[in-house]
Image: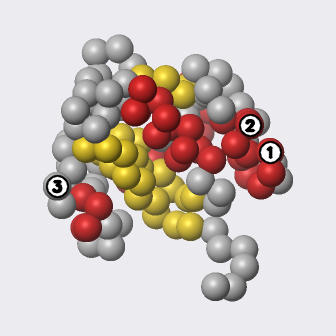
Amino acid sequence: MRTRGEPLLIDADLAVPVPLHPFRRRERGFNQAEDLAQHVGLPMVAALRRVRRTVAQADLPAARRHGNVKGAFAARHGRSVSGKIVVLIDDVSTTGATLDACAIALKEAGAREVRALTAARVVTQRR
């Protein structure tokens, strides 16, 4: 991710992992986005929190994913992203719904720019 994502990382200030709901974090024992964010060469800041539990995106059809995560994320108090270029880190992007919802929360918290870097992207049709 660090090599392939270099154009996104080069002038960025922070890496922010997509958070898991506390229940899912306890169940899984780790946050894969957090693990990835620790290795991209930027200071990692857990600047987001999940404010409500959602159905796993993988369990939903694409058309319902944006609604599922709308308003599900908020900025953590005391973790400033104001004026910063933030790289949002997640493991997989399918529709981009989770990344969009997180980016909205980061922009509302004052981030100057939000970029996204994922380990994988699901491709459902040939380009």
96 vs 13: above or below: below
Q: How is the image coloured?
A: secondary structure
The amino acid type found where label 2 is placed reads Gly
Q: Is residue 97 left or right of residue 125?
A: left
> Can residue 51 be seen?
yes
Q: At x 56% / y 38%, what residue is drawn?
A: 101
Q: At x 35% / y 40%, what residue is drawn?
A: 16
> Can residue 25 be seen?
no
- Read off the residue under disc 2: 67
- Read off the residue under disc 1: 64
- Read off the residue under disc 3: 11
Mark 3 or 2, nearer chain start = 3
Relative to the observer, which residue lies in front, 51 or 127?
Answer: 127
Q: Is residue 30 left or right of residue 64?
A: left
Q: At x 53% / y 46%, what residue is drawn?
A: 99
Assign the N terminus to one quadrant of the image.
bottom left
Q: Real-space Cα distance between discs 1 and 2?
A: 6 Å
The total of numbered circles placed on residues is: 3
Query: Which image quadrant for residue 123?
Result: bottom right
